Structures are given as structure tokens and as C-alpha cells.
Amino acid sequence: MAGFLQFIVLFLLTTVPLLSQSNSLIRVQAEVDKSIITIGDRLTYTLTIDHQEAIRIEQPGPGANLGQFEIKDYQIHDPAKKNGNIIQKFEYEISVFDTGRFIIPPFPVAFFESDTSRDFQIIQSEPIEIFVESVLTADNRELRDIKPPQSIPFNLKKWLIYGIITLIIIGSTVAIIYFINRRKKGISLFRKEKIRPAHEIALERLAELRNHWQHMLQKGEAKVLFTEISDLLRKYLENRFFIKASEETTFEISQSLSEMEIGEKHQIIAIQVLEFADLVKFAKYIPDEGETENNLEMLEKFIDETKLIFETVEHQIEISKENTDNQETPIVTKKEIVQK
């Protein structure tokens, strides 16, 4: 009886995973050969895609987005068949030149349920945490004494002093002449730079994109176009919300926006534009004109609804005049610029 029960348990342990695997259309798994490295050391990041034969996927390229890690080399293995599924492996040899805790962001994979399907879906791997340690030991971190100054020959020192004095006199003379000429022309010595609002800069760039995005699609430059769209949105997020969007992945930007005082609707719009741009840049997806126009409209809507608006508010301050008996108290208006 005990032997029969062991056989049943063994049968369930081997059969249930196979049934679960056969019911899955596609699975994406990411792993590394080590999670703790020293600065400059290399590690291998392996992406495994297990999918049914009817599924069509867009293969990841050599320019994958792996966060702050730099890709040193990559290898694409030939597809293999197992239990009626196709297994594809992509290996990236990566490195980073800083210490601390790093996150390899989720890797997006676009797939189509059939060869004739035009509707894609995206599946992502899990993020991976990597710790980078310094190669310096405690002994190497000790400060060493400064070496004593070396004596300079007398003649060299004298000519060096003469040269410095001469340069100071010439430079001062030129600066004075330049300053006097600008004063005569009524030109200020220092240039005042006007700081433009973030939304004005972003909408100006967006208007330029609208003038030639159709021509770029026709020339097959969809990747270049959506790289510009992604950069435009990231620059706006930096200047408007003061986050390092240009250095962060889409996953990290999503986390940063969730901590800001911004509505969930606007968070969703921003992440949708960035994820679609990532799909075009890294998954080699070719968008049509309708999809591109929709992304441009969402981008414009996000900028317009999250821009900062400044208005002038007037406050009246009464100033009493001393030593006056029959005169009316003047009213002074104070104008302030407040953020709306």
C-alpha cells in the first residue's frame, strides 16, 4: 500500500507541471550567473523564452535595455524544441562601473498569437537585484601623507613670476577695454538668460516632430522617431517633476511618478507612451500612422494637463502717513506671482 501511495505522489509531481506548461502560451525567465560582483567585473544575464510553436515573437536585439549595465558581448542560441514548445536563449555579458545596489529592469518581449496576427502582447521577466562591491580593501583606503614640495630652480621661478604678472596685466587691460566699449554701446556686461517653462520647450519640440513624423515612418525611421518621442517625454519629466528620467528605465520612472503628486490617469498616459516607445526601439515593432498619431496626441495631452501655470495675484497694503491729519491714506498694490 505504501509503495502504491509513493507511485501516486511521484506521478502527480511529474505530471502536474507538464500539464501547467502545456497550457501556457509563452513564458519568459531571466537569470544571472551571480548576484554579487566587484566593480568592473562581468556577469552573464540569460533570457529564456519558452513558447508554443504557433506563437511568433519579436527577438530581442543586441541593444537591449538593461538599466545601468553596459553590454559587453551577447550570444543568441539556436532555438530548441522540447515537449512541443520552442525554447530560445539569449545571453548578454554585462558590466557596471559603480558600486552599490542595482536593478536589472524587467525585460519586455512582444509576441503574436499567430503568424498572421497584427495584435501583439507584451510579457515581461522579473527584475533582478545585483550588488556591486569595491575592489579596494580596508588597507588600501587609508590616506597617505602628501609628498613634500619639490624646489624649483631660482631662474625658472623668476621667469614664471614675470610671465604670470605679464599675463595678468594684458588680461586686465583687455577686460577693461572690452567693458568700456560695451558700456558705451549700452550693452550689459552680463547676459541675462531667460528660463523657459518646461511645457513650452516640450511643446515646441513636439510641434517640430509633428511636421515630419509621417515622412520618417515612410523612410523606415520608426526607431529614430520613437527615440525622439521618448527623449522628449523624459526631458519634460526631468524639468517638470525633477526626477532623473533620462537615467532611469521605464520601470524606474513608473516608481518615481507613483511617489509624486500626480494623478493616476496621467501616470498611466506617461507610462503607456514610454512602453510603446520601448517596444519600437527594442522589440523592433513597426507602428502604423494611427498608432503614432495616437501616441503623439497622448503625449501632448499629458504635457498640457500637467504643466505649471503662473498667475499674478494682487494684494492691497495700506500705508499710513504719519504727521498727517486730513489726508487720505494711500493704497499700494503689491503684485505677486503664484503657482496655480
Image (cartoon, helix red, strand yellow):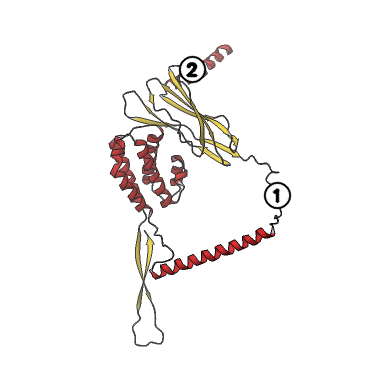
* Tag count: 2
Mark linked to residue 15: 2
**Looking at the picture, which amino acid does disc 1 mark?**
Arg
Asked whether disc 1 touches disc 2, contact meaning CB atoms under 8 Å apart, the reply is no
Identify the image quadrant of residue 217: top left
Identify the image quadrant of residue 287: top left
The local secondary structure at tag 2 comes to helix
Mark linked to residue 144: 1
Taking the spot 30% from the left edge, 47% from the top edge, the residue there is: 207
Identify the image quadrant of residue 133: top right
- The x, y position of residue 60, in whole percent, is 43, 29
- The x, y position of residue 170, in whole percent, is 52, 64
Report if residue 277 is visible in the image: yes
User: Relative to 322, is 70 above or below?
Assistant: above
Q: Is residue 132 left or right of residue 182?
A: right
Q: Earlier in the sequence, mark 1 or mark 2?
A: 2
- The x, y position of residue 232, in whole percent, is 38, 46
User: Relative to 52, is 140 above or below?
Assistant: below
Task: Locate the N terminus and report the quarter of the image it occupies.
Answer: top right
Q: Residues within 10 Å of mark 1 (few under 14, many from 20)?
A: few
Report if residue 272 is visible in the image: no
Q: Is residue 120 left or right of residue 72?
A: left
Task: Locate the C terminus and report the quarter of the image it occupies.
Answer: bottom left
Taking the spot 37% from the left edge, 35% from the top edge, the residue there is: 280
Q: Is residue 137 left or right of residue 212?
A: right
**Looking at the picture, which amino acid does disc 2 mark?**
Thr
Taking the spot 39% from the left edge, 34% from the top edge, the residue there is: 279
Nearest to viewer (mark 1 / mark 2): 1
- The x, y position of residue 172, in whole percent, is 52, 66
